[in-house]
Amino acid sequence: MSEPREYLYKILVVGDLGTGKTSIIRRYVHNIFSSNYKSTIGVDFALKVIQWSPEIIVRLQLWDIAGQERFGNMTRVYYKAALGAFVVCDLTRQSTFEGVTKWKDDIDAKVSLPEAWGGGRIPVVLLANKSDLVNDGHGQHVNPAEMDELCEKHGFIKWFETSAKDNTNIDEAAKFLIKSILDIEEQHGSPDLEEDERIQLEESNANNSGGCC
């Protein structure tokens, strides 16, 4: 029996300050939730290993980009070699919805798929987070038609209404993004990363096998 193929995917998690990016990552990676996370400073990341199928193992690096880092000079460095992204907004704060298009434009301007995959935009999923607070009477649920229109207009491949607290649609959103990247991988083969990018990702993998740094 042949050894399973292993893929290493760097995934960005971006959005305005306080939208729940760290909570989403920790729910997905460790299945834990706390309302007392401190704001991320700069960048943090976590690793999750997924047995996608008997033939495929996916190693996800989830890069938590701080909200206050938006459009700073360092984001281009943080985005390097990413193959997909989540943009997160807060259902209880309308201003964070206005920010998602700017985050998406920033990603599109600073990172692209490998040339071996034809270049172009990386797949990006929009997460409308904190649905648990809406259920408690804060803010309101999104209008699906409006969200569909927003995604089509700005190039998001899909959107999900999520809650890190209730673990709503976190796994589903991740599976959709992973499948989107795998589909590209199957069409074009493994991307030919530059040597320094490959070393950086492999070292990060080895140094952070326990989860968040």
Image: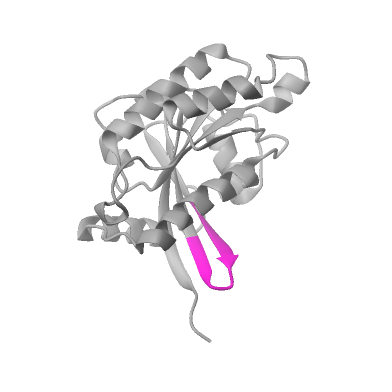
Magenta stretch? 47-58
- Asked whether residue 39 is in view, the answer is no
Total marks in image? 0
View extreme (left): residue: 195
Q: Which residue is drawn at 40% across and 60% down?
A: 187
Q: Taking 178 as reference, is 75 above or below it?
A: above
The x, y position of residue 132, in whole percent, is 72, 27
View extreme (right): residue: 136
View extreme (bottom): residue: 1
Q: Main secondary structure of the magenta part?
A: strand
Dividing the picture into quadrants, the one containing residue 112 is top left
The x, y position of residue 167, in whole percent, is 70, 40
Q: Image check: 150 left or right of 187?
A: right
Dividing the picture into quadrants, the one containing residue 136 is top right
Q: Which residue is drawn at 59% across and 36% down?
A: 23
Q: Nearer the viewer, residue 114 or 16?
A: 114
Residue 107 in magenta? no
- Asked whether residue 13 is in view, the answer is yes
Q: Image check: 194 left or right of 145?
A: left
The x, y position of residue 75, in whole percent, is 30, 33
Q: Residue at x 43, y 31 (%)?
A: 155
The x, y position of residue 188, in whole percent, is 35, 60
Q: Residue at x 77, y 22 (%)?
A: 135
Q: Image check: 142 left or right of 177?
A: right
Residue 50 in magenta? yes
Q: How is the image coloured?
A: one colour
Q: Taking 139 as reference, is 60 above or below it?
A: below
